[in-house]
């Protein structure tokens, strides 16, 4: 996004105090990571961002917002200064203005699990037809990250033609606020599962929160507003759009678990290995089967077939070339440690390490364990604490251990104080299952235990690493391979 001083003041609903001569583009809030020629937005939180205005301008910013009466915080120089009633609200107003100038599809993605991978799949699909395109980067999915993504645009090029935006929430109302800013034309809900229970309280409340953006869908680029929803989530049923909503609804998932109406993108076959292979069946708008689409994904796990199916639904709605979309999806690499496949040479075999360390809740644990169970050879689950689960956290951890035993996992290592319950429940549920627990920082002990499980194996095995981000389970992966 680029502004003149006058345009910046108008878009931020502010007052122009000083007009610089340098171009203004994009925005940033951290003076340690400045955007050259950018707009510095001083956020008032634990620390007052106004204190960092001189550093931000010295680092290359060409403009800054300031709160009421804070213009004196800006040093002399060729800088644009705009006073606003509240700097965060000023940033949000700039995001609304940027969104108003975007005529193409704007896809908002919510859900308990799979948002980031689905975001990567949808971005890849849309890039086959829309250039330039803006997309959420990293964890910029909250009340600060979303506006920064929208006002960032595509620096130095023409305005973006489409946007793919991840919305993250941990409390009711947060997705509603983000969707008001994003103004999506497409809303994808990836899944509904127990998450942030300390703040959400129940699965029903989680479903209601993830569905909040449905109320803000609007037509864009000549297409009706679209909701892409999992067809096997009972908790979503009360929030489904009615026939008079004007929304198009496409449902994806497994036919065996579908509820109510037929699926529009059905996952009819999945094979898990070095690649996740899936066959999707697409239903035409006339209700008849349209075509089959085969995918070979680089992201590990049967659950990623669901994420890809959601992206295919978006692509079909927009009329994209599905063969080109399939090639684009197959080229998507895992985002960080979300289903990344690595290798470990040990005992004469090449064992698979599945790094899925970025986040975890009971639903994503179950999905990852289910995919691990589909592999051959010794199967080892290294599972860490799941955080923010509230008063039922012990029971929920024990359920994961019981599920691991039910699926036939051969060995379970719990990492962290809460994950001890996972190992204990797995051992209780299946006599002969090897289970152990270590403290969060006992990296060497964890590595020694894992190596002992694999060294005497008669065939290659697989080790799944999964935990909430705060456990930093990737340390074990790195040390094991080190």
Image (spheres, rainbow, N blue to C red):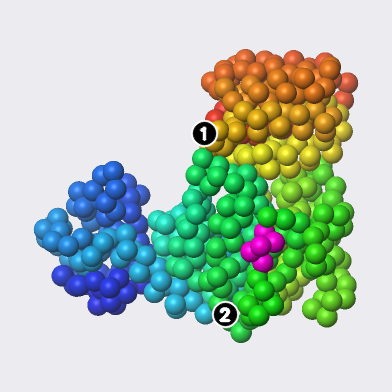
Image quadrant assignment for residue 293: bottom right
**Vertically, is 101 above or below 358?**
below
**Residue 135, can we see it?**
no
Q: Secondary structure at mark 1?
A: helix
Q: Position of residue 161 (x, y in %)?
A: 54, 75
Q: Is residue 231 left or right of residue 334?
A: right
**Vertically, is 79 above or below 374?**
below
Q: Position of residue 211 (x, y in %)?
A: 59, 61
Q: Position of residue 286 (x, y in %)?
A: 83, 80
Question: Which residue range is magenta in the image?
Answer: 236-240
Question: How far apart in space, not on screen, are marks 2 and 1 (Cα)?
Answer: 39 Å
> How many other residues sit within 10 Å of disc 1, few (<14), some (14-19) or many (≥20)?
some
Q: Decide whether the magenta segment is chiefly helix, strand or loop.
A: helix
For label 1, the residue is: 470
Q: Is residue 47 left or right of residue 112?
A: left
**Vertically, is 433 above or below 329?**
above
**Vertically, is 151 above or below 480?**
below
For label 2, the residue is: 220
Q: Residue at image x 50%, y 48%?
A: 170
Q: Secondary structure at mark 2?
A: loop
Q: Nearer the viewer, residue 426 or 334?
A: 426
Q: Nearer the viewer, residue 233 or 274?
A: 233
Image quadrant assignment for residue 101: bottom left
Question: CB under 8 Å between callouts 2 and 1?
Answer: no
Q: Residue at image x 80%, y 64%?
A: 260
Q: Earlier in the sequence, mark 2 or mark 1?
A: 2
Q: Nearer the viewer, residue 17 or 287?
A: 287
Q: Residue at image x 84%, y 39%?
A: 374
Q: Quadrant of the C terminus?
A: top right
């Amino acid at each position: 996004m680029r502004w003149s001083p006058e345009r910046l003041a108008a878009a931020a609903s502010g007052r122009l105090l000083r007009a610089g001569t340098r171009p203004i583009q994009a925005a940033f809030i951290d003076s340690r990571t400045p955007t050259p020629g950018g707009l510095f937005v001083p956020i008032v939180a634990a620390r007052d961002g106004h204190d960092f205005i001189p550093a931000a301008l010295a680092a290359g910013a060409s403009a800054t917002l300031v709160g009421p009466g804070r213009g004196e915080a800006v040093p002399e120089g060729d800088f644009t200064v705009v006073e606003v009633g509240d700097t965060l609200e000023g940033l949000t107003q700039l995001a609304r203005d940027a969104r108003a100038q975007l005529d193409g599809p704007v896809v908002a993605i919510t859900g308990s699990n799979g948002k980031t991978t689905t975001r990567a799949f949808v971005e890849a699909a849309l890039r086959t037809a829309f250039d330039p395109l803006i997309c959420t980067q990293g964890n910029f999915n909250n009340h600060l990250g979303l506006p920064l993504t929208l006002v960032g645009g595509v620096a130095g090029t023409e305005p973006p033609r489409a946007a793919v935006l991840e919305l993250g929430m941990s409390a009711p109302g947060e997705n509603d606020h983000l969707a008001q800013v994003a103004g999506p034309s497409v809303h994808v809900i990836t899944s509904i599962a127990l998450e942030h229970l300390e703040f959400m309280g129940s699965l029903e409340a989680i479903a209601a929160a993830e569905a909040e953006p449905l109320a803000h869908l609007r037509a864009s680029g000549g297409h009706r507003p679209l909701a892409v929803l999992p067809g096997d989530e009972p908790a979503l049923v009360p929030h489904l759009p009615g026939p008079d909503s004007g929304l198009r609804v496409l449902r994806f998932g497994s036919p065996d678990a579908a509820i109510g109406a037929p699926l529009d993108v059905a996952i009819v076959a999945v094979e898990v290995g070095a690649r996740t292979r899936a066959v999707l069946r697409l239903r035409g708008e006339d209700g008849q089967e349209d075509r089959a689409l085969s995918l070979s994904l680089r992201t590990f796990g049967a659950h990623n077939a669901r994420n890809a199916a959601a992206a295919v639904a978006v692509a079909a709605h927009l009329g994209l070339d599905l063969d080109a979309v399939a090639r684009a999806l197959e080229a998507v690499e895992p985002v960080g440690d979300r289903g990344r496949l690595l290798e470990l040479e040990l005992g004469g075999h090449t064992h698979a390490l599945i790094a899925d360390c970025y986040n975890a809740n009971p639903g994503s644990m179950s999905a990852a364990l289910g995919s691990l169970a589909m592999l051959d050879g010794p199967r080892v689950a290294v599972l860490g604490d799941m955080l923010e689960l509230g008063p039922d956290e012990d029971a929920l951890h024990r359920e994961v251990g019981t599920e691991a035993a039910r699926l036939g996992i051969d060995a379970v290592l719990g990492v962290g104080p809460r994950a001890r319950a996972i190992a204990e429940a797995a051992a209780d549920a299946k006599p002969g299952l090897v289970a152990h627990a270590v403290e969060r920082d006992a990296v060497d002990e964890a590595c020694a235990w894992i190596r002992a499980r694999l060294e005497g194996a008669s065939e290659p095995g697989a080790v799944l690493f999964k935990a909430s981000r705060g456990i930093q389970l990737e340390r074990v992966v790195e040390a094991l391979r080190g």
